[in-house]
Amino acid sequence: MADAAALIDTEAVLARRPQSVGRMFLDRVAETPEREAFRHRVGTDWRSLTWAAAADRVRAIAAGLLALGVAPEQRVAIASSTRLEWVLADLGVMCAGAATTTIYPSTPREDVAHILADSDSRVVFVEDAAQLEKIRSMAERLATPPTLVVLDGTLDGPTGPTGPAEAARTLTLAELEQRGHQQLRDHPGCVDDAVAAVGPEHLATLMYTSGTTGRPKGVRLTHGCWTYEGVAIAALDLVRPDDLQYLWLPLSHSFGKVLITAQLTVGFTTAIDGDVDRLVENLAVVRPTFMGAAPRIFEKVHGRVIRTAQSEGAAKYKVFIWAFRVGGQVAELRREGRTPSRRLAAQHALADRLVFAKLRARFGGRLRFFVSGSAALSREVAEFFSAAGILILEGYGLTETSAGTTVNLTGRYRFGTVGMPLPGTEVRIAADGEVLVRGPGVMSGYHGPQGPDEPVLDADGWFHTGDIGELEDGFLRITDRKKDLIKTSGGKYVAPQAIELAFKATCPYAGHIVVHGERRNFCSALITLDPDAVASWADQHGMSGKPYEDIVGSEEARAMVQDYVDQLNAKLARWETIKRFALLPKDLSIETGELTPSLKVRRGAVERRYQDVLDGLYADG
């Protein structure tokens, strides 16, 4: 059967690109003005915004920025969690002809100071009082203190300015929009003129990501990068105008940003709420048809489902195991284009009623698929959800490639891979196994001078990703990060990511795991347990109510983890096995710098923090 993606006319796709993100947004508004664009939570209620209503606010924000004197390609920062106002502010920046600098709300002060100075951002949208105070505390260290626009709340009380100079450069979002309305009255065509002046080569986004030194570096993404992503995703027919997306991903991350770009092209509705703690609750209410997520979300749900089944007694757990065995058989047959036998189909219908339908209902019952990105997804976890009738499509991309490089499709997917390239994007494997990418979504370069060891664009336009992978029948498989490969003192190479994924798929109580062994004579691991999961386990083992540190420090917890490590080791080559491990006294977190905001483990930061623990594992070895 011919691959549908191979039949796409790439030149025709590229020819459909609008000249800028602002033009793409205004085209969407003109095409479907009264359709629902966004849905956002206010208290316990969800409110809707049409494309026309969104455009009114975006134009006011853009005009307000122009009234502040923001110039073409001048940087405007957004320091906020995911919320409707983030999207409106970003689109306002695009329609003003400026460029967005992204700042995670959890970014440490020193890094925020570096980002603002390096980007020379003249305006900063801040989410709330906490972000306002953070930016103000470093304002005097900047050559030009920026104007601050508060997205949430007022300027009364502790958020109020402390002097005339601060007052002059501090506004609420409503005040900025009021200035914008006045600007539009005085200069009716100002926003349209600003949009018309922007071309695909102009800077749209400075998205900061950590380099090998840990110092954030700005990735320069042009309007052409984002408009390409929009039309390329639309050409795949993966998402459709009648879809409803649930968006919680950080919009300061390219994965979240590209999903909004796809929305502008395709025209589906997006429900936005960045509160991860309300994720499952919101899904049951919003009932989306698709959602993007980091693998950690699926790992946590996978572990929770297994633990719940185990806690309901031996008889129910036996039914659970039977159901997933049947579901797995049916899913595999369907992937191969085959039909289950009458008997297997009847068993599957019973398994669906007893087990799978309940799991799908937790996600709202209308889900067509999940998209997994930002880190590797375990094949075992993907197959587990597939057995229940929940498809997880894994994709791949980096900030430097505008997030969207490859993706599996509903009619063309292979578990364990990250899919095939988007139309117009090329992928090849270098002699040393490194994945190279070339195409319209690749950055124009880094902002400012970079060290010689950073991934670079070569003379032929290939971006060296730093990932190790392989191509099989056009599907890309990522095996590890080039810099993360471990070489033991015995000369054996170990790919830690594959081992870590296998452990998290094996142990339903796993939080995070970092495999270690560079220049050591065997592999070891630092392991954390999921706080919610281990609390449930503690209730069943006479430790109810005890602090996390006491639970993981117990002999019972260590014996439990050892059992799962033994199961893991049985699947590994001798030199890959985990000979020793340590249970850490707390889970890894974004706040401590051990996780990125997209929930990837910062391996170097974890190893540095627990160097004494690692050395102890090898003390007599």
Image: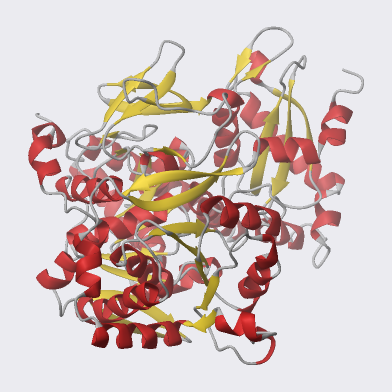
User: How many circles with numbers are drawn on the protein?
Assistant: 0
Residue in the foreground of this view, choosing between 454 and 118: 118
Residue at 20% x, 67% y: name it: 193
Name which quarter of the figure residue 186 lies in.
bottom left
User: Is residue 489 shown left or right of residue 420?
Assistant: right
Q: Is residue 585 left or right of residue 405?
A: right
Where does the image place residue 602, in percent across and percent down from the top left?
Answer: 64, 41
| Quarter residue 433 falls in | top left
Question: In this image, 160 relative to 38: left or right?
Answer: right
On the question of residue 605 being in view, the answer is yes
> Farthest residue toward the right?
620
Q: Quadrant of the N terminus?
A: top left
Q: Pinpoint residue 341: horizontal percent, then vertical percent.
A: 19, 40
Q: Is residue 278 left or right of residue 71?
A: right
Up/down of 567 relative to 41, above or below: above
* Residue 505: % across, % down: 54, 40
